[in-house]
Amino acid sequence: MADDPELIPGIHIYCDRWCGRCAYTSRCLQFRLEASERESSGALQNFDALNSQFWQEMGEALVQVMRFIRDIAASGGLEAGDLQRETLFSAPPATLQRDAREHPCAIAALHYAGMVNEWFAATDKLPDAEESLLTHPPLFLEESIQVIRHYHYFIYPKIVRAVEGRLGGEAASNRDLCDDASGTAKVALIAIDRSLAAWSLLYKEYPEQEDSTLSILLHLDRLRRSVEVVFPDARSFIRPGFDAPYS
Protein backbone atom coordinates (compact mmCIF):
# COMPACT_ATOMS: atom_id res chain seq x y z
CA MET A 1 0.00 0.00 0.00
CA ALA A 2 2.84 2.39 0.85
CA ASP A 3 4.23 2.04 -2.67
CA ASP A 4 1.18 3.72 -4.20
CA PRO A 5 2.56 6.74 -6.13
CA GLU A 6 -0.62 8.70 -5.42
CA LEU A 7 0.20 8.87 -1.70
CA ILE A 8 1.80 12.03 -0.29
CA PRO A 9 4.62 11.03 2.09
CA GLY A 10 4.31 12.56 5.56
CA ILE A 11 1.05 14.42 4.88
CA HIS A 12 -0.36 13.24 8.22
CA ILE A 13 2.45 14.77 10.29
CA TYR A 14 1.12 18.34 10.18
CA CYS A 15 -2.59 17.71 9.74
CA ASP A 16 -5.43 18.66 12.08
CA ARG A 17 -6.55 15.06 12.79
CA TRP A 18 -9.94 15.62 11.20
CA CYS A 19 -10.13 12.93 8.54
CA GLY A 20 -13.85 13.49 8.12
CA ARG A 21 -13.15 16.99 6.80
CA CYS A 22 -9.83 16.41 5.05
CA ALA A 23 -9.47 17.04 1.32
CA TYR A 24 -6.60 14.55 0.98
CA THR A 25 -7.82 11.29 2.50
CA SER A 26 -7.35 9.47 -0.80
CA ARG A 27 -3.65 10.35 -0.70
CA CYS A 28 -2.91 9.67 2.97
CA LEU A 29 -1.40 6.34 4.03
CA GLN A 30 -2.33 6.94 7.67
CA PHE A 31 -6.00 7.29 6.72
CA ARG A 32 -5.92 4.10 4.68
CA LEU A 33 -4.32 2.18 7.54
CA GLU A 34 -6.75 3.47 10.16
CA ALA A 35 -9.96 3.33 8.15
CA SER A 36 -12.21 0.55 9.38
CA GLU A 37 -14.08 0.44 6.10
CA ARG A 38 -12.19 0.96 2.88
CA GLU A 39 -13.86 2.86 0.09
CA SER A 40 -13.00 2.93 -3.59
CA SER A 41 -10.40 5.44 -4.73
CA GLY A 42 -13.00 7.27 -6.80
CA ALA A 43 -15.37 7.61 -3.86
CA LEU A 44 -12.59 9.01 -1.70
CA GLN A 45 -11.66 11.56 -4.34
CA ASN A 46 -15.28 12.74 -4.58
CA PHE A 47 -15.37 12.97 -0.77
CA ASP A 48 -12.14 15.02 -0.80
CA ALA A 49 -13.57 17.45 -3.36
CA LEU A 50 -16.59 18.15 -1.13
CA ASN A 51 -14.30 18.85 1.82
CA SER A 52 -12.15 21.14 -0.29
CA GLN A 53 -15.25 23.21 -1.08
CA PHE A 54 -16.19 23.30 2.62
CA TRP A 55 -12.83 24.77 3.66
CA GLN A 56 -12.96 27.29 0.83
CA GLU A 57 -16.26 28.57 2.24
CA MET A 58 -14.77 28.70 5.75
CA GLY A 59 -11.82 30.65 4.33
CA GLU A 60 -14.21 33.23 2.94
CA ALA A 61 -15.85 33.50 6.36
CA LEU A 62 -12.41 34.10 7.90
CA VAL A 63 -11.81 37.05 5.57
CA GLN A 64 -15.11 38.55 6.69
CA VAL A 65 -14.42 38.10 10.40
CA MET A 66 -10.99 39.73 10.14
CA ARG A 67 -12.65 42.77 8.56
CA PHE A 68 -15.20 42.73 11.36
CA ILE A 69 -12.49 42.66 14.04
CA ARG A 70 -10.71 45.59 12.38
CA ASP A 71 -13.99 47.52 12.39
CA ILE A 72 -14.47 46.78 16.10
CA ALA A 73 -10.92 47.98 16.79
CA ALA A 74 -11.48 51.15 14.80
CA SER A 75 -14.67 51.92 16.73
CA GLY A 76 -12.61 51.63 19.90
CA GLY A 77 -10.02 54.10 18.63
CA LEU A 78 -7.39 51.57 17.54
CA GLU A 79 -5.62 51.83 14.20
CA ALA A 80 -4.77 48.71 12.19
CA GLY A 81 -1.13 48.99 13.26
CA ASP A 82 -2.10 49.22 16.92
CA LEU A 83 -4.19 46.09 16.59
CA GLN A 84 -1.31 44.22 15.01
CA ARG A 85 1.00 45.13 17.90
CA GLU A 86 -1.52 44.17 20.59
CA THR A 87 -0.54 40.62 21.51
CA LEU A 88 0.05 38.70 24.71
CA PHE A 89 3.57 40.14 24.73
CA SER A 90 4.66 43.73 25.27
CA ALA A 91 8.17 42.87 24.04
CA PRO A 92 9.86 39.96 22.22
CA PRO A 93 8.92 37.08 24.52
CA ALA A 94 11.55 36.12 27.05
CA THR A 95 8.71 33.96 28.36
CA LEU A 96 9.79 31.22 25.97
CA GLN A 97 12.11 30.17 28.78
CA ARG A 98 9.12 29.11 30.89
CA ASP A 99 7.71 25.64 30.95
CA ALA A 100 5.61 25.17 27.82
CA ARG A 101 2.38 24.72 29.77
CA GLU A 102 2.97 28.02 31.55
CA HIS A 103 3.64 29.89 28.33
CA PRO A 104 1.18 32.79 27.80
CA CYS A 105 -0.05 31.33 24.50
CA ALA A 106 -0.73 27.95 26.10
CA ILE A 107 -2.55 29.58 29.01
CA ALA A 108 -4.61 31.66 26.57
CA ALA A 109 -5.51 28.55 24.57
CA LEU A 110 -6.64 26.79 27.74
CA HIS A 111 -8.65 29.87 28.68
CA TYR A 112 -10.32 29.75 25.27
CA ALA A 113 -11.47 26.18 25.95
CA GLY A 114 -13.10 27.42 29.15
CA MET A 115 -14.77 30.32 27.30
CA VAL A 116 -16.26 27.85 24.82
CA ASN A 117 -17.69 25.70 27.62
CA GLU A 118 -19.20 28.74 29.32
CA TRP A 119 -20.70 30.07 26.07
CA PHE A 120 -22.50 26.84 25.23
CA ALA A 121 -23.68 26.37 28.81
CA ALA A 122 -25.12 29.90 28.84
CA THR A 123 -26.72 29.46 25.41
CA ASP A 124 -28.42 26.25 26.52
CA LYS A 125 -30.05 28.21 29.36
CA LEU A 126 -31.62 30.83 27.07
CA PRO A 127 -35.45 30.93 27.35
CA ASP A 128 -36.05 29.63 23.82
CA ALA A 129 -33.47 26.84 24.06
CA GLU A 130 -35.16 23.47 23.75
CA GLU A 131 -32.17 21.15 23.33
CA SER A 132 -28.44 21.40 23.86
CA LEU A 133 -26.80 23.35 21.05
CA LEU A 134 -23.76 21.09 21.16
CA THR A 135 -25.68 17.87 20.64
CA HIS A 136 -28.66 19.16 18.62
CA PRO A 137 -27.54 22.21 16.63
CA PRO A 138 -29.86 23.75 14.03
CA LEU A 139 -29.04 22.47 10.56
CA PHE A 140 -27.76 25.80 9.26
CA LEU A 141 -25.22 26.03 12.12
CA GLU A 142 -24.24 22.38 12.30
CA GLU A 143 -21.02 22.73 10.29
CA SER A 144 -19.85 25.81 12.21
CA ILE A 145 -20.43 24.05 15.52
CA GLN A 146 -18.59 20.98 14.22
CA VAL A 147 -15.57 23.20 13.53
CA ILE A 148 -15.71 24.76 17.01
CA ARG A 149 -16.08 21.39 18.71
CA HIS A 150 -13.26 19.75 16.78
CA TYR A 151 -10.72 22.48 17.61
CA HIS A 152 -12.09 23.22 21.10
CA TYR A 153 -9.38 21.25 22.93
CA PHE A 154 -7.06 20.86 19.95
CA ILE A 155 -5.33 24.25 20.03
CA TYR A 156 -3.85 23.99 23.54
CA PRO A 157 -1.84 20.74 23.12
CA LYS A 158 -0.58 21.88 19.71
CA ILE A 159 0.74 25.13 21.17
CA VAL A 160 2.34 23.27 24.09
CA ARG A 161 4.02 20.84 21.67
CA ALA A 162 5.22 23.72 19.47
CA VAL A 163 6.73 25.59 22.43
CA GLU A 164 8.40 22.41 23.73
CA GLY A 165 9.85 21.77 20.27
CA ARG A 166 11.10 25.32 19.97
CA LEU A 167 12.79 25.17 23.37
CA GLY A 168 14.34 21.78 22.65
CA GLY A 169 15.53 22.86 19.21
CA GLU A 170 17.13 26.04 20.50
CA ALA A 171 18.78 24.25 23.43
CA ALA A 172 20.27 21.60 21.14
CA SER A 173 20.87 23.98 18.21
CA ASN A 174 18.77 21.58 16.18
CA ARG A 175 17.24 23.25 13.13
CA ASP A 176 15.01 20.26 12.38
CA LEU A 177 13.35 20.52 15.80
CA CYS A 178 12.80 24.26 15.31
CA ASP A 179 11.28 23.65 11.89
CA ASP A 180 9.01 20.96 13.35
CA ALA A 181 7.91 23.44 16.02
CA SER A 182 7.01 25.95 13.30
CA GLY A 183 5.00 23.28 11.48
CA THR A 184 3.13 22.39 14.66
CA ALA A 185 2.48 26.07 15.36
CA LYS A 186 1.09 26.43 11.84
CA VAL A 187 -1.43 23.67 12.52
CA ALA A 188 -2.46 25.53 15.70
CA LEU A 189 -2.83 28.75 13.71
CA ILE A 190 -5.01 27.03 11.12
CA ALA A 191 -7.21 25.71 13.94
CA ILE A 192 -7.48 29.24 15.34
CA ASP A 193 -8.29 30.68 11.90
CA ARG A 194 -11.04 28.15 11.32
CA SER A 195 -12.45 28.64 14.80
CA LEU A 196 -12.57 32.39 14.22
CA ALA A 197 -14.50 31.84 11.00
CA ALA A 198 -16.95 29.47 12.71
CA TRP A 199 -17.59 31.83 15.64
CA SER A 200 -18.25 34.70 13.25
CA LEU A 201 -21.14 32.70 11.78
CA LEU A 202 -22.61 32.16 15.26
CA TYR A 203 -22.20 35.80 16.24
CA LYS A 204 -25.22 37.08 14.32
CA GLU A 205 -27.48 34.18 15.29
CA TYR A 206 -27.41 34.70 19.08
CA PRO A 207 -27.84 38.40 19.93
CA GLU A 208 -28.31 37.53 23.61
CA GLN A 209 -24.76 36.18 23.59
CA GLU A 210 -23.29 38.98 21.50
CA ASP A 211 -20.89 40.27 24.16
CA SER A 212 -19.50 36.85 25.07
CA THR A 213 -19.20 35.85 21.40
CA LEU A 214 -17.32 39.05 20.68
CA SER A 215 -15.01 38.34 23.64
CA ILE A 216 -14.22 34.93 22.15
CA LEU A 217 -13.51 36.44 18.72
CA LEU A 218 -11.17 39.07 20.17
CA HIS A 219 -9.45 36.53 22.43
CA LEU A 220 -8.83 34.16 19.51
CA ASP A 221 -7.56 36.99 17.32
CA ARG A 222 -5.13 38.07 20.02
CA LEU A 223 -3.96 34.47 20.49
CA ARG A 224 -3.51 34.14 16.72
CA ARG A 225 -1.28 37.21 16.57
CA SER A 226 0.67 36.11 19.63
CA VAL A 227 1.47 32.69 18.15
CA GLU A 228 2.69 34.50 15.03
CA VAL A 229 5.05 36.57 17.20
CA VAL A 230 6.49 33.53 18.97
CA PHE A 231 6.73 31.46 15.77
CA PRO A 232 7.49 33.96 13.00
CA ASP A 233 8.22 31.18 10.50
CA ALA A 234 5.01 29.25 11.14
CA ARG A 235 2.87 30.79 8.40
CA SER A 236 5.54 30.17 5.76
CA PHE A 237 6.12 26.54 6.79
CA ILE A 238 5.31 24.22 3.89
CA ARG A 239 3.26 21.20 4.95
CA PRO A 240 3.49 18.18 2.63
CA GLY A 241 0.52 18.12 0.29
CA PHE A 242 -1.47 20.89 1.98
CA ASP A 243 0.70 23.90 1.13
CA ALA A 244 2.47 22.79 -2.02
CA PRO A 245 1.39 20.81 -5.09
CA TYR A 246 2.46 17.18 -5.01
CA SER A 247 2.37 15.09 -8.16
Image (cartoon, rainbow, N blue to C red):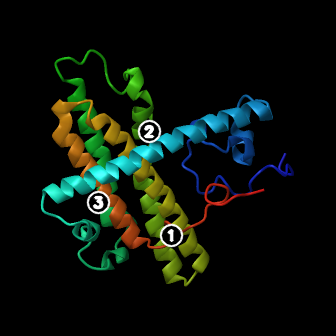
Residue located 59% across and 38% down the image: 51
Q: Considering only order in the chain, which callout, 3 or 1, is on the residue closer to the N terminus?
A: 1
Q: Considering only order in the chain, which callout, 1 or 2, is on the residue closer to the N terminus?
A: 2
Residue located 24% across and 37% down the image: 118
The type of residue carrying mark 2 is Val
Q: Secondary structure at mark 3?
A: helix
View extreme (top): residue? 130
Residue located 27% across and 30% down the image: 205
For disc 2, the marked residue is 147
Crowding near the residue tagged with mark 2, few <14, some 14–19, many ≥20 C-alpha atoms within 10 Å:
many
Residue 169 seen from this side: yes
Q: Which mark is residue 165?
A: 1
> How much space separates mark 1 and mark 3, taking CA atoms?
22 Å
Q: Secondary structure at mark 2?
A: helix
> How much space separates mark 2 and mark 3, taking CA atoms?
19 Å
Labelled pair 2, 3 in contact (Cβ < 8 Å): no
The type of residue carrying mark 1 is Gly
> How much space separates mark 2 and mark 1, taking CA atoms?
26 Å
Q: Which mark is residue 228?
A: none
Q: Nearer the viewer, mark 1 or mark 3?
A: 3
Relative side of 66 to 185, left or right = left
Q: Position of residue 220 (x, y in %)?
A: 31, 53
Q: Secondary structure at mark 1?
A: helix
Relative side of 78 to 130, left or right = left
Q: Is residue 70 above or below residue 80?
A: above
Where's the N terminus, which quadrant? top right
For disc 3, the marked residue is 222
Q: Is residue 107 above or below residue 34?
A: below
Residue 107 seen from this side: no
Q: Nearer the viewer, residue 137 or 243?
A: 243
View extreme (right): residue? 3
Crowding near the residue tagged with mark 1, few <14, some 14–19, many ≥20 C-alpha atoms within 10 Å:
many
